[in-house]
Amino acid sequence: MLAPMIAVAVLLASLVLGSLASPPDVMDWTAEEGLIERSTVMLYFFAALVVAADRQRLHAPVWIALAALLVAAAARELDWHKAFTGTSILKLSYYFSDAPLRHKLAALAVVACLVAAAAYLALRFARGTWRALRARDAAAITAVTFLACMVISKLVDRSLNVLAQDWQLSISAQARSLQLAIEELMELELPLLVLLGLVQLRLAAGRAALVSLQAAASHAADPGSGPG
């Protein structure tokens, strides 16, 4: 249950930060290329390197798909897609804009590859993760916690914009700083959960290998265990 505990701790920390720190300080810490975002990017790249280093156990195309998604997450934090296209390549309006066709095709190819990678991992592991979750497997709990935190961070990201744009509500600086604290700290948490899940998978594999070795040694030591 380590992952849910981390998620709760991060949420509480973000609430404290957003409530007690001054809005200018929160804006500075959560700004583009600020401390929190730089840390998030480095953790995503580090997680991708860990996945690539573990390719003998994860095998292709699992490690390729996972590493590609992690690098894409880091690139999104750095706004590399906006540097190339001027806007988000995930917005449908971009593909109907007057942007150069070659840019649209390149962006569409990138999105298609990432969707394919995510779909492959979902089809490959969704059912097994559900079974493992029911058995309270640590890595499965971490995976579900990751998905929940990702969804919540996106909802928080859009919440105040919806209130301001769709409902014409006035948003205070304190409310904006609270939103930024929750969103950015939860995004920082995501690559940490990936790393935690990788550690948990490696530990589980080590325990399974040890049990197999012990069973084999016990079988070899028992003279009555062979075929009659």
Image (cartoon, rainbow, N blue to C red):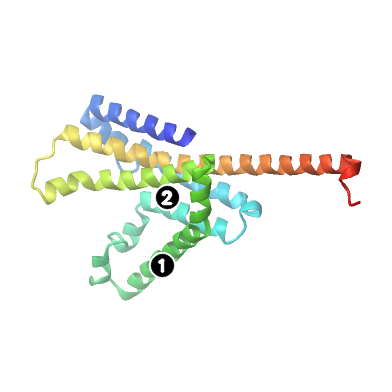
Crowding at mark 2 (Cα within 10 Å: few <14, some 14-19, many 20+) = many
Type of amino acid under label 1 = Ala
In depth, the one of 146 and 42 nearer the eye is 146
Residue 126 screen position, x and y as percent = 48, 55
- For residue 69, side relative to residue 204 (left or right): left
Crowding at mark 1 (Cα within 10 Å: few <14, some 14-19, many 20+) = few
Residue drawn at the location 17% of the way across and 49% of the way down: 162
- For residue 107, side relative to residue 168 (left or right): right
**Considering only vertical position in the picture, is 120 above or below 36?**
below
Sequence order check, earlier mark of 1 and 2: 2
* Residue 46 in sight in this render: no
Residue for badge 1: 112
**Considering only vertical position in the picture, is 112 above or below 195?**
below
Residue drawn at the location 26% of the way across and 43% of the way down: 156
Residue drawn at the location 31% of the way across and 75% of the way down: 101
Residue 180 screen position, x and y as percent = 27, 38
Type of amino acid under label 2 = Ala
Residue for badge 2: 74
Task: Report the disc number at residue 47.
Answer: none
* Residue 125 in sight in this render: yes
Residue with the most extreme top position? 20
Residue 55 screen position, x and y as percent = 62, 54
Residue 53 screen position, x and y as percent = 61, 49
Distance from the alpha carbon under mark 1 to that under mark 2: 18 Å
In depth, the one of 153 and 188 nearer the eye is 153
Instruction: Judge depth for marks 1 and 2 and give the one in front.
Output: 1
Residue drawn at the location 45% of the way across and 62% of the way down: 119
